[in-house]
Every structure is written in C-alpha cells, then in structure tokens.
Amino acid sequence: MVTKAPRPPPHPFLYFVLFLPFGATAGYVMVTIGYLASKAHIPDGTVAALVAMNTLPHTWKFLWAPAVDALWTGRRWYVSTNLVSSAAIIALGFIPITSGNVGILEVVIFVNGLATTFIGMCTEWLMAHLTPPEQRGRAAGWSQAGNLGGATVGGLGLLIAQRLVALHDGRLWATSEPDRGCVFAFALPYSTEGEEGRKDEDTVGG
C-alpha cells in the first residue's frame, strides 16, 4: 500500500499577501475618499460617517462568521469576496464625491467593508487549518504585517504622490464631476536649461 506524503504547510509569508487587500481597501477609504470628500467641502461629520461605514460590518461579523466554516470553502469565499471588494473600490472611482451622492457612497463603502470581513475571516480560516502549531506565531505576525502594509499602500499612496510632486515644485489635485467620476491630476515644471546646455556642448565639440 502506497501512502502519499503529507503536503507541507504554506510559508507564513502567504498570510502577508492574503491580508494585503484587507488593509489596502480600508486605507483607501479612510485617506483617499476622506481627502476627496474634504476637498468637496463635505462636512467633517459626514466624512467620518463615510469612513465608519467601512468599519461597521466588522462590528457584526460574528453573525455571519459561521458561514465560512459551514458553507462553501475558505478559498472560494476568499476569491469571491475579493472580487466584490475590488468591484466596490473600482465603483468608488466612478462616483462623484459630492454631498448629493453621500447615500450611494455609504452603500458602496458598506459593501466593501462587508466583503473585507470575509477576506479577513477566510485568511484566518486558512491559518487555522493549514498552519502547524509551531508556525502559528509567525503566521499571525505576517498577517498583521499584511494588514498594516496594505493600509499603507491604500492610504499613503495619495500622501506619497503629493510629496513627490511637491519635491519637484509641482502640484497635485483632484476633481469630481457629476456622472463622470473622479480625476487625479498632477503638473510638473518643465525646464529647457539642460537641453540648451547639451546643444552648446555639441556646438563646441563640433
């Protein structure tokens, strides 16, 4: 009788990758959407409510957490809810950030928050089922690093872009038009001094 060797557990770094979308979408809502709403002169209380809609589903996720174990598989839940979350984030890019659209923004942000509850739970499900006891500490550490790293990517992208443009004496701005969505734009100064210098060198050398 031939027995198959047990499959080795995945490297704990896998959970860093799996948790990245969880943190990235939260950072995008908190920083980028918050910034655009503030620039659109939406009251601070309303902006805070938009951000809170992304967190609200996490308060009640214990109600649907058993579904991850009882229905379907963790992998399928992860893939499908990642697609839902991605669709919600893409949709936010097409919805003008205006006071009149606060209601629809809240719905889309809530849907994203609901989807990310499953992303987190499915990653934890995989950790519980695939990680041996001696690697659980490392797996938990990598998962938290993915959460924080994702939030950095999703939330600080706007800040990084602003800093890079400012270092080159440029400017970065965003506009929101009804029925068209949001546009991020930047402008950098252009100098011909370098080109003129090269032309002079070419002339002298000739």
Image: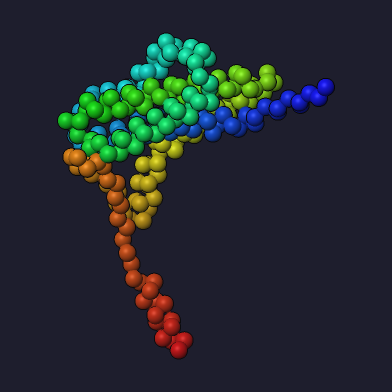
Q: Position of residue 157 (x, y in %)?
A: 40, 41
The answer to whether any part of residue 181 appears in the image is yes
Side (left or right) of 127 relative to 81: right
Q: Position of residue 10 (x, y in %)?
A: 65, 29
Q: In this rendered view, identify the residue nearer to me: 18 or 141.
A: 18
Side (left or right) of 106 relative to 147: left
Q: Position of residue 85 (x, y in %)?
A: 39, 30
Q: In this rendered view, identify the residue nearer to me: 66 or 151.
A: 66
Q: Is residue 26 above or below residue 170?
A: above
Q: Position of residue 120 (x, y in %)?
A: 48, 23
Check the picture and name the quadrant holding the C terminus: bottom left
Q: Is residue 37 above or below residue 64?
A: below
* Most distant residue in the bottom direction: 206
Side (left or right) of 189 relative to 79: left
Check the picture and name the quadrant holding the N terminus: top right
Q: Residue drawn at (81%, 24%), measured in percent from left and top?
A: 2
The answer to whether any part of residue 151 appears in the image is no
Q: How is the image coloured?
A: rainbow
Q: Residue drawn at (22%, 37%), measured in percent from left and top?
A: 96
Q: Is residue 27 above or below residue 193?
A: above
Q: Residue drawn at (47%, 14%), measured in percent from left and top?
A: 67
Q: In this rendered view, identify the residue nearer to me: 68 or 128.
A: 68
Q: Kindly indicate the quadrant of the structure image that contains residue 34.
A: top left
Q: In this rendered view, identify the residue nearer to me: 197 or 59.
A: 59
Count of numbered tags: 0
